[in-house]
Image (cartoon, helix red, strand yellow):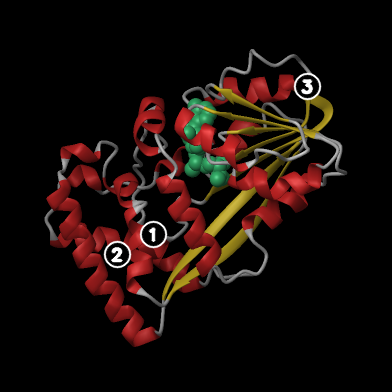
């Protein structure tokens, strides 16, 4: 499905800055993924408001080509949302979920509790897989997480080491201008509020995106192919959009939200609500165009 129109391309060229936010591993662990609220909110909205009948997890399952007996490692498994959906494809296999943040890792464990596929949960950073022997896994996945990893090259070398020679690594990330409509709204409000210049930055996903990902993966894997997946979230209710936006606006606005204070974010949300309500009244819904891709590495 192709949601990416020339108008969206034009908007992206105008709106998305070259400079992007960087988030530290400590922030990932202690702020953004200290609990599951941010992930739960995003996943719920992605599922409820999507337009593509083939979800991201359907796309992932397809790329993984599972026979049902594989040993799979999920780097940055978060709250186990992806693993819960892949698990039926691994009825005779096994799962290891690794994450740097104990809060979400415990939620993943609870989510898969009682399933017959053996599961193991490991707290750690994806650039140190020393607890796994060489050739341990048939599949490794990393979904929307590689931009957080402090040493990406070391992580990819480690993935190659723990992956069996005939295994497959599926690295999934976005274009930096994915959901450009939200950034357009966000930056317009920041300009209205005369916000500090340092807030006009792209998402941290620009660090390793589907635009520059080949530069990282090609030196570690003999075969690399990029397969894209698109969606469009359509919100016909401003409150539902606000909940989704609030799960992002710390990321878009600052790596240390505490610097700005709650009043700043309250005003940001109020202004967003007014603008989105006007779009919904005019167009019927507010659309966010998603542009994701998976590097299939073997
Ligand atoms: C946006 S979430 C994605 C979660 C899950 N893969 C999904 O798609 O639902 C990013 C995850 O990466 C984890 N993470 C961040 N830095 C990490 C690191 N260095 N090593 C392992 N996990 C990390 C976070 O704690 C968080 O759970």
Quarter occupied by the C terminus: top right
* Quarter of the image where one finds residue 8: bottom left
In the rendered image, residue 5, in percent from the top left (x then y), is placed at 52, 72
The residues bearing labels 1 and 2 have C-alpha atoms spaced at a distance of: 13 Å
Within-10-Å neighbours for mark 3: few <14, some 14–19, many 20+ = some
* Quarter of the image where one finds residue 116: top right
Left or right: 32 in relation to 191: right
* Quarter of the image where one finds residue 216: top right
In the rendered image, residue 225, in percent from the top left (x then y), is placed at 72, 45
Question: What's the mark number on residue 287?
Answer: none
Circles 3 and 2, Cβ within 8 Å, touching? The answer is no
The residue labelled by disc 1 is: 244
Q: Nearer the viewer, residue 233 or 208?
A: 233
Residue 237 visible (yes or no): yes
The residue labelled by disc 3 is: 136
Name the residue: 88% across, 44% down.
67
In the rendered image, residue 115, in percent from the top left (x then y), is placed at 73, 40
Q: Nearer the viewer, mark 3 or mark 2?
A: 3
Within-10-Å neighbours for mark 1: few <14, some 14–19, many 20+ = some
Label 3 residue near ligand 1, CB within 8 Å: no
Name the residue: 29% across, 37% down.
255
Within-10-Å neighbours for mark 2: few <14, some 14–19, many 20+ = some
- Sequence-earlier tag: 3 or 2: 3
- The correct choice, above or below, for 234 with respect to 183 in the image is below
* Label 2 residue SS: helix
- The correct choice, above or below, for 263 with respect to 142 in the image is below
Quarter occupied by the N terminus: bottom right
- Sequence-earlier tag: 1 or 2: 2
């Amino acid at each position: 499905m192709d949601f990416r129109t020339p108008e969206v391309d034009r908007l992206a060229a105008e709106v998305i800055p070259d400079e992007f936010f960087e988030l530290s591993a400590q922030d990932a662990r202690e702020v953004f993924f200290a609990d599951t609220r941010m992930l739960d909110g995003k996943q719920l909205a992605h599922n409820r408001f999507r337009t593509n009948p083939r979800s991201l997890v359907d796309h992932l399952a397809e790329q993984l080509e599972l026979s049902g007996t594989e040993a799979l490692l999920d780097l940055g498994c978060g709250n186990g949302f992806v693993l819960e959906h892949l698990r039926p494809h691994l009825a005779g296999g096994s799962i290891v979920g690794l994450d740097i943040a104990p809060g979400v890792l415990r939620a993943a464990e609870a989510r898969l509790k009682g399933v017959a596929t053996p599961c193991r949960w490991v707290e750690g950073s994806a650039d140190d897989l020393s607890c796994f022997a060489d050739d341990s896994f048939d599949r490794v996945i990393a979904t929307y997480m590689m931009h957080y990893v402090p040493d990406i090259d070391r992580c990819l070398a480690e993935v190659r080491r723990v992956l069996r020679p005939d295994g497959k690594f599926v690295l999934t990330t976005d274009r930096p201008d994915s959901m450009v409509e939200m950034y357009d709204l966000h930056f317009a409000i920041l300009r209205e509020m005369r916000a500090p210049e340092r807030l006009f930055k792209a998402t941290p996903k620009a660090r390793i995106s589907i635009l520059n990902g080949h530069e990282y993966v090609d030196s570690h894997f003999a075969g690399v192919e990029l397969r894209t997946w698109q969606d469009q979230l359509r919100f016909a209710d401003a409150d539902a959009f606000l909940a989704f936006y609030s799960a992002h606006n710390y990321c878009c606005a600052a790596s240390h939200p505490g610097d700005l204070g709650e009043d700043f974010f309250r005003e940001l949300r109020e202004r967003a609500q007014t603008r989105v309500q006007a779009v919904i009244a005019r167009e019927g819904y507010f659309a966010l165009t998603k542009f994701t891709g998976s590097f299939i590495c073997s």
